[in-house]
Image (cartoon, rainbow, N blue to C red):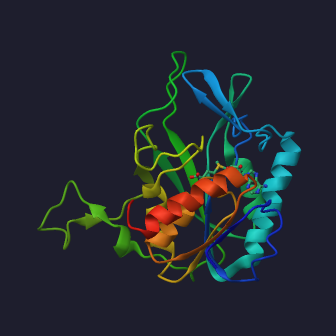
Amino acid sequence: MNQIFNHSSEIMSEIPDKTVSLMVTSPPYNINVDYGNKWANGKLIETKGKKYIDNLEETEYRKMLERAINETKRVLKDNGQIWFNIKNRYDKGNIIPPFWIMDFFQDMFLKNIIIWNFDWGGSTNKRFCSRYEFVFFFTKQKENYVFNLEDVKIPALNYRPDRYKTQLKNPTDVWRISLVSGNSPERTEHPAQYPEELIERIIKTGTNEGDLVLDPFMGSGTTAIVAKKLGRNYVGYETEQDFINIAEKRLNYAEQGLF
Ligand SMILES: C[S@@+](CC[C@H](N)C(=O)[O-])C[C@H]1O[C@@H](n2cnc3c(N)ncnc32)[C@H](O)[C@@H]1O
């Protein structure tokens, strides 16, 4: 398929039932991220008009996510899987953990809650700085799903040749993967871009070459780029044409093998 559609993923009529092998996404978090303007050193340097507003009324926000998740379930193959990246939010001094999303996945199997740990971010001095987000991993069926563990094993630090056949081990459910830094070649203008390395591990684990990968909130196209680099197909939705333009530029670079 290999297309990003410019409308809300609440309706995915372009995708036939049971054709997607894996969905991976980070949805908007409803934390007032400024998706429309360009800032540098605290100064507004460019306004690009009306953009997606990341501060919906909370029930409307959750309904929007639920509709996109229900559409995902429709297009997911019977052996398909969903990886959902979300983080804690803060409200009036309290942490609001994102476990409410479990309500939308009652008919699926929760296989892992990955802690994605990174090494930098906002700084605070009245509590510990937060350095993780969650990635929830759900499957449609209990046992029947792709899990290519051998393709994503990592070097074992405490390798003992007398005990283990190989120096490689299961990466576990705590993943230390850097955020996309300001000077990384991956960096785009998108304010909430996730790193290719995170998505590479997920797509390698849960799909085989030629499979179709869906991202209902495509942003700058990270999911599509990684899928393409790994010989998978992609389909996605993004409400902002500017971000689709960025994704298409990245896809062209990837096609030329530039990065
Ligand atoms: C957290 S960002 C995704 C970033 C992406 N993972 C990346 O690496 O660039 C969420 C994106 O969802 C888009 N969006 C918001 N509501 C949407 C909807 N209903 N349907 C499709 N896209 C939507 C926003 O414009 C934003 O670009």
* Quarter in which the N terminus is drawn: bottom right
Could one spot residue 112 in this view of the protein? Answer: no
Q: Is residue 82 above or below residue 113?
A: below
Which residue is located at x 73 percent, y 34 percent? 32
Q: Is residue 102 above or below residue 143?
A: above
**Residue 111 is drawn in which quadrant?**
bottom right
Q: Residue furthest top?
A: 125
Image spot of residue 196 (x, y percent): 46, 56
* Quarter in which the C terminus is drawn: bottom left
Number of numbered discs overlaid on the protein picture: 0
Could one spot residue 235 in this view of the protein? Answer: yes
Q: Is residue 144 above or below residue 248?
A: below
Which residue is located at x 47 percent, y 75 percent? 147
34 or 243: nearer the eye? Answer: 243
Which residue is located at x 52 percent, y 46 percent? 188
Image spot of residue 34 (x, y percent): 69, 35
User: Does 95 sit left or right of 67 as displayed?
Assistant: left
**Residue 71 is drawn in which quadrant?**
bottom right
Image spot of residue 33 (x, y percent): 69, 36
**Residue 244 is drawn in which quadrant?**
bottom right
Image spot of residue 123 (x, y percent): 50, 23
User: Does 233 sit left or right of 33 as displayed?
Assistant: left
